[in-house]
Image: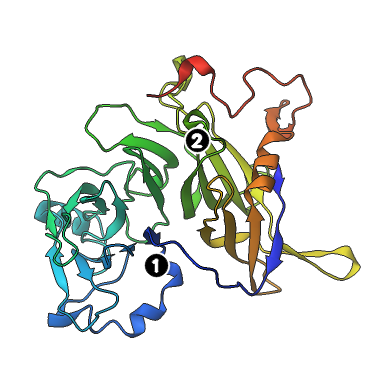
């Protein structure tokens, strides 16, 4: 595992942004809550879980507790359109009997809003610890979108977390959903998944289960070359350091990568990624006596597109886990430095205690993290 280099910045310059459909993490939009009266007219209460903005069509989707809201960002005085999407009664009751809160947990908290095509948005909710997914139809009209929810609901397992409190990230691209989420009631079995949302029956692929992950960063599809066969999906998250000792609870931030054409392995690696790699995302500020202040906990990520789609600029918001010093920082990364980390030396488990050490043998072909040309996913 390589360390991706960073440079800290405490101020961001504004740039002209292209008009497009954009997902936003709610963690950086808390200021919306203070002026949310127009969103919650009619006595409806809830919390924001997901946002999807279409700048071309001029609408904003807000996913909340048992509801999806359609707003006009440039005309907030217009009535808010609302879809009621509750969890099934039996799932709410099972959730309550399991000791969960009816008010804050046993409901359908909408966690995912991702553009599927020009007329539909794919959406998932926790479903009172029984995750569910469906399609939201908006149509082509810019004046008055249809805004209806499909009656066909499918399982959200591996696509959406069970709990509204669990960190989560997902990206829908080419009909495949890449999600970092847990897949059990207790939230102990977390992994990075790829599942199909087109009903094609394509099997899922996942990473091995970790002891504990905080997958609250972001996920983005970024091409590596002009060939679609080289397209990758990058995940940004934080986790308990796997290279640390058994009793070391240190948390590191990561950037991970998978190939979009990965079909999984054979035998013991069936339904497992063969191209999954991750590197440490380092955000630090030089201090006196050569001691750096480390900001290890990733809070959010933003990808700023440039004229070159292969080389966006990555902005990360970090905090420190130190018990002595409390602070935060913004670090900026180039895709060139991230790719250099993945193309450099790597670690593997070795020795009687099965610890992570640098691999010093001959690099195998195909190189770890790449797909053999005869195993492309179609």
For the point 67% across and 46% down, the residue is: 336
Q: Left or right of 291: which side holds 36?
A: left
Name the secondary structure under disc 1.
helix
The answer to whether residue 1 is visible is: no
Give x and y (percent) for residue 6: 70, 57
Whether residue 144 is situated above or below residue 336 in the rendered picture: below
Q: Work out whether residue 249 or residue 22 is closer to the camera in this orientation and state it.
A: 22
- Which corner quadrant of the image does residue 38 belong to? bottom left
Name the secondary structure under disc 2.
loop
The answer to whether residue 43 is visible is: yes
For the point 14% across and 78% down, the residue is: 79
Circle 2: is it few (<14), some (14-19), or many (20+) Cα within 10 Å? some
Q: Distance from label 1 to label 2 (Cα)?
A: 27 Å
Whether residues under marks 1 and 2 lie with C-beta atoms below 8 angstroms apart, the answer is: no
For the point 41% across and 80% down, the residue is: 31
Q: Left or right of 125: which side holds 296?
A: right
Q: Quadrant of the N terminus?
A: top right
Q: Quadrant of the C terminus?
A: top left
Q: Left or right of 180: which side holds 357?
A: right
Circle number at residue 26? 1
How many numbered markers are drawn?
2
Q: Left or right of 212: which side holds 338?
A: right
Give x and y (percent) for residue 264: 45, 23
Disc 2 target residue:
231
> Mark 1 or mark 2, which has the lower sequence index?
1
Give x and y (percent) for residue 324: 71, 73
Dot in front, 1 or 2: 2
Whether residue 124 is situated above or below residue 193 in the rendered picture: below
């Amino acid at each position: 595992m390589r360390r991706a280099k960073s440079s800290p910045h405490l101020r961001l310059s504004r740039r002209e942004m292209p008009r497009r459909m954009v997902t936003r993490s709610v963690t950086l939009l808390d200021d919306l809550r203070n002026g949310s009266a127009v969103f919650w007219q009619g006595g409806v209460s809830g919390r924001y879980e997901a946002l999807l903005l279409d700048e071309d069509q001029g609408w904003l989707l807000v996913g909340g507790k048992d509801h999806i809201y359609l707003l006009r960002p440039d005309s907030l005085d217009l009535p808010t359109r609302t879809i009621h999407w509750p969890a099934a009664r039996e799932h709410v009751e099972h959730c309550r009997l399991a000791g969960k809160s009816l008010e804050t947990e046993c409901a359908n908290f909408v966690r995912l809003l991702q553009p599927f095509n020009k007329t539909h948005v794919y959406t998932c909710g926790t479903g009172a610890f029984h995750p569910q997914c469906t399609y939201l139809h908006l149509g082509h009209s810019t004046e008055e979108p249809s805004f209806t929810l499909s009656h066909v609901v499918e399982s959200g397992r591996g696509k959406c977390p069970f709990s509204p409190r669990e960190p989560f990230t997902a990206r829908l691209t080419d009909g495949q959903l890449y999600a970092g989420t847990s897949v059990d009631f207790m939230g102990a079995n977390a992994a990075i998944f790829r599942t199909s949302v087109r009903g094609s029956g394509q099997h899922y692929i996942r990473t091995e289960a970790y002891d504990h992950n905080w997958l609250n960063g972001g996920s983005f599809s970024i091409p590596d070359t002009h060939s679609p066969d080289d397209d990758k999906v990058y995940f940004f998250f934080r986790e308990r350091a796997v290279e640390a000792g058994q009793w070391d609870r240190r948390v590191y931030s990561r950037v991970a990568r998978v190939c979009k054409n990965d079909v999984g392995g054979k035998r013991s690696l069936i339904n497992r990624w063969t191209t999954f790699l991750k590197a440490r995302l380092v955000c630090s500020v030089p201090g006196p006596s050569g001691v750096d202040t480390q900001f290890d906990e990733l809070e959010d990520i933003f990808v700023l597109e440039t004229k070159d789609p292969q080389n966006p600029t990555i902005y990360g918001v970090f905090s420190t886990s130190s018990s002595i010093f409390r602070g935060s920082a913004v670090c900026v990364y180039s895709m060139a430095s991230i790719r250099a980390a993945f193309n450099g030396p790597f670690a593997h488990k070795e020795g009687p205690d099965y610890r992570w050490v640098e691999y010093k043998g001959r690099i195998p072909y195909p190189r770890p993290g790449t797909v053999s040309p005869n195993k492309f996913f179609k």
